[in-house]
Amino acid sequence: MLTLLRDLIQHKWSANAGLLKAVAQHKPSNEDDELRRLLHHILIANRFWLALSMESAFDEKKESTVPQTLDALTAGYRETCGRELDWISNLEETNLARRLETPYIPGISFSVAEAVMQVCMHSHGHRAQGATRLRLLGGTPPAMDFILWLKERPAPCWD
């Protein structure tokens, strides 16, 4: 299970970086506030579940501030990617069953494995929305399919 979760996380960051790069290269998309808010939402969800899984603090007020530029947002993605890849590379199979609780969904707990699946699937769904928005604005979304990523397993390209 851990191997698959690591692959899903690595794919997530590669796909996120690809979408951000496509948005950055298309001026109307780069300047689109709606798209930037959606991309920010993906990031803060990732940061929330990662903080919860790592048992570290999450400053909701600070995290909720949408960066003014795509470059600033991309910097947040890059930093979070590094933290999550470091964390997952040191995780052991036995850590996946640890239970997590969040005040945002009271009355239920989630395993670390379920949290990882949630953030990967959540990111996937919103990346699809971002790709649709990019296309509506006249841009071209990158290929982001997991199955295509498996062929060469590219690392995220943030440049």
Image: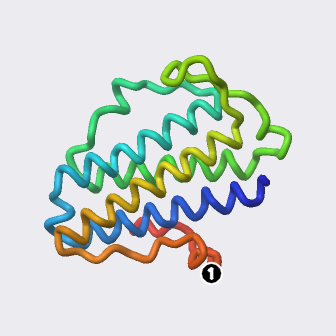
Residue 50's image quarter? Answer: top right
Residue 126, image x and y in percent?
39, 54
Residue 157, image x and y in percent?
46, 69
Q: Is residue 87 left or right of residue 23?
A: right
Q: In which quarter of the image is the C terminus?
A: bottom left
Residue 90, image x and y in percent?
76, 47
Residue occupying image coordinates x 37% and y 66%: 19
Residue occupying image coordinates x 67% and y 62%: 7
Front residue (pair 116, 20): 116
Extreme-right residue of the structure:
94
Front residue (pair 74, 129): 129
Front residue (pair 79, 125): 125
Q: Is residue 43 above or below residue 112?
A: below
Q: In this view, does 31 lie to the left or right of 22?
A: left
State the SS at label 1.
helix
Q: Quadrant of the N terminus?
A: bottom right
Q: In this view, does 27 lie to the left or right of 12?
A: left
**Disc 1: which residue:** 152
Residue 94's image quarter? Answer: top right
Residue 39, image x and y in percent?
33, 51
In this picture the colour scheme is rainbow
Residue 109's image quarter? Answer: top right
Q: What residue type is labelled 1?
A: Glu
Residue occupying image coordinates x 62% and y 81%: 152
Residue occupying image coordinates x 44% and y 61%: 16
